[in-house]
Image: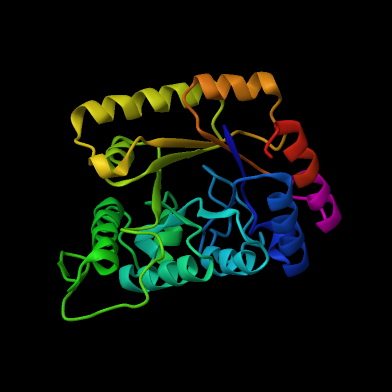
Amino acid sequence: MKFGLHSVNLHTCAYPDAAARLGRAAEAAGFDSLWVADHVVLPDPPSPERPMPPDQRLLDPIVALTFLAAHTTRILLGTGVIILPQRQALVLAKQLASLDVLSNGRLVFGLGVGWCEPEMRSVGVSFPDRGRIADEYLAAMRAVWTQPKPAYKGRFVAFEGVQAMPRPVQTPTPRIVVGGRTAPAFRRAVMQAHGWYGFGLDVATTEKFVGALRDAAKKHPRPAELGRLEIGVTPPGFDVPDKTLVSAYTAAGVDRLIIRPKPDMDAAALERFAADAGRALGAS
């Protein structure tokens, strides 16, 4: 089992001193990865389905990870997850390639299609088309990262006769992780990603979704070069899981547990949390 920290661009972590101290402490404690959330805007008033405070501090994920890259040397830097349809495919490809270069190949590109219709509407994205947009954008990004003469023609993105340098350090692409709890998300993970990520999942729900991923793998071909699908999960709540719970997630098929610090922790408390959690989990 590997261990990561999520929400490192939220709340107190959205201040530079706290973010830098947490990043360094997490790396020293043996965590393998830092993960950021993504929302360009939040509904005001909050959505009844997921009532996130509209005034919540939330840094842009790529900017936050670039800052953390400058304060760490080894730890992986993951987006958990970028809402892909809300970005422009080639702009995002350039930003992620730049982050991979500046971090010496530490990017993990987690993506999802989004759930918040008011957010999509505010940035001019068709909510019903978000899955199709995401599939095209991912294909276009692969093209600009890997093809000698990049070109792609789709309904939502098309280009040819261009180059975007530098390309990512990781070849042929950075590691790609898909988030989502639907059949299309499971299909996308199986066919296009190195891993799948689930947020706020208890053991029973994790078992259910891992089973759904196995079923999807029977229906959809998985490219051999992607290797085994890696499973990452953030448990519900903010408690550090004990050894019994870690064993239960391991038995459910999880490869990486990505835990969260409490939102009200100050910079010093965040440092202590990373050190104490690392020891408790045996992360180093």
Q: Which of 170 and 140 is in front in this view?
A: 170
Q: Quadrant of the C terminus?
A: top right
Q: Where is residue 158 in the image (x, y as percent from the top left)?
A: 18, 71
In the image, residue 102 above or below residue 48: below
Q: Residue 225 appears in which quarter of the rendering?
A: top left
Q: What stretch is highlighted in magenta?
A: 261-273
Instruction: Report if residue 269 lies within the magenta region.
Output: yes
Q: Which residue is drawn at 60% across and 53% down?
A: 75
Q: Residue at x 32, y 36 (%)?
A: 186
Q: Is residue 156 visible?
A: yes
Q: In this view, does 48 lie above or below 73?
A: above
- Of 166 and 156, nearer the camera is 166
Could one spot residue 261 in this view of the protein? Answer: no
Residue 241: x percent and y percent? Answer: 69, 29
Residue occupying the point 70% across, 38% down: 238
Q: In the shown orientation, is residue 20 left or right of residue 102?
A: right
**Horizontally, is 22 left or right of 160 in the view?**
right
Report the residue that reaches farthest toward the right: 268
Which quarter of the image is occupied by the N terminus? top right
Q: How is the image coloured?
A: rainbow
203 lies above or below 165: above
Front residue of 136 and 251: 251
Above-or-below relation of 164 to 79? below
Image point (63%, 69%), residue name? 70
Q: How many marks?
A: 0
Q: Is residue 276 magenta?
A: no
**Residue 223 at x, y = what percent?**
23, 41
Relative to 67, is 191 on the left or the right? Answer: left
The location of residue 94, given as percent across then percent down, is 38, 73
| Residue farthest left in this picture | 153
